[in-house]
């Protein structure tokens, strides 16, 4: 039987995936500052040279991990909204808000996206991450609510940007001040309800 050899691109993609897969639990458990590149390379079963061939530095690897975490959170919210059995798009928007905060309670999400990402990626990097993964879903939910006559006929893209920014900032606030969690969620729901078409 002939064994098919992997292409350079396939080997590169496998190495990259191994590094992200190895770094993700390390960053989630101990945080960015406490994890060194030799440990990540060992856990991935690759050399440090191979790691630096894939990622310019530890921050670039962290950015890939943060993107993977954000993508997983978004996929779970999409699945939840898709199977909610709810026909009211405004109710679905509220459910998505709750799901975001439920995800933010998870240790991995809290550590990677809310504690380390603002420091490692900076505000612009954090904003880009939220826009790449959460903006599309938010815009779909907002558009559906506007089209159904449940929200005021505002520009859906602009409103989605504002809501994503509010959700991101609210999550950061709750991470810094957990006692504000319930009130912050209540404020976000009130913000959405304030846009309801009466």
Image (cartoon, rainbow, N blue to C red):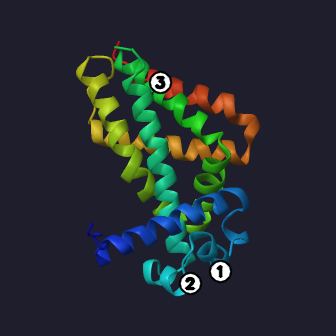
| Total numbered labels placed on residues in the image | 3
Q: Which mark is residue 48?
A: 2
- Quadrant for residue 38, please give it: bottom right
2 and 1 marks in contact (CB < 8 Å): yes
Horizontal relation, residue 101 to residue 4: left or right: right
Measured in 3D between alpha carbons, the distance from the residue under mark 3 to the one under mark 1, in whole angstroms, is 43 Å
Q: Where's residue 140, x and y in %?
A: 30, 34
* Residue at 47% over, 81% down: 56
Q: Is the residue under label 1 in contact with that under label 3 (CB below 8 Å)?
A: no
Residue denoted by label 3: 94
User: Is disc 2 surrounded by few (<14), some (14 to 19) or many (20+) residues within 10 Å?
Assistant: some
Secondary element at image label 3: helix
Residue 103: give x, y in percent of width and height.
58, 38
| Mark 2 to mark 1 CA distance (whole Å) | 6 Å
Outermost front residue: 1
Q: Nearer the viewer, mark 2 or mark 3?
A: 2
What is the secondary structure assignment of the residue under circle 1?
Answer: helix
Residue ranking furthest to the right: 179
Asked if residue 116 can be seen in this view, the reply is yes
Neighbour class for label 1 at 10 Å: few (<14), some, many (≥20)?
few
Q: Residue at x 35, y 38 (%)?
A: 137
Check disc 2 and report its element: helix, strand or loop. helix
Above or below, 41 against 164 in this view is: below
Report the disc number at residue 38.
Answer: 1
Q: Earlier in the sequence, mark 3 or mark 1?
A: 1
The quadrant of the picture occupied by the N terminus is bottom left
**Residue under the image location 71 percent in, 57 percent down:** 29
Q: Quick one: label 2 or label 1, which is nearer the N terminus?
A: 1
């Amino acid at each position: 039987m002939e064994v098919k050899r992997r292409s350079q691109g396939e080997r590169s993609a496998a190495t990259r995936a191994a590094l992200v897969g190895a770094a993700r639990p390390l960053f989630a458990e101990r945080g960015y500052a406490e994890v060194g590149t030799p440990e990540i390379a060992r856990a991935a079963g690759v050399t440090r040279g191979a790691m630096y061939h894939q990622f310019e530095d530890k921050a670039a690897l962290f950015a890939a991990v943060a993107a993977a975490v954000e993508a997983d959170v978004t996929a779970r919210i999409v699945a939840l909204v898709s199977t909610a059995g709810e026909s009211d798009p405004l109710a679905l928007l509220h459910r998505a808000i709750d799901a975001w905060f439920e995800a933010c309670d998870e240790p991995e999400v809290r550590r990677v996206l809310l504690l380390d990402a603002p420091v490692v990626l900076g505000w612009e990097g954090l904003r880009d991450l939220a826009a790449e993964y959460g903006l599309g879903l938010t815009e779909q939910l907002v558009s559906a609510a506007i089209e159904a006559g449940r929200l005021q006929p505002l520009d859906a893209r602009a409103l989605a940007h504002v809501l994503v920014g509010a959700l991101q900032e609210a999550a950061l606030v709750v991470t810094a001040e957990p006692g504000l969690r319930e009130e912050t969620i209540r404020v976000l729901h009130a913000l959405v309800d304030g846009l309801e078409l009466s």
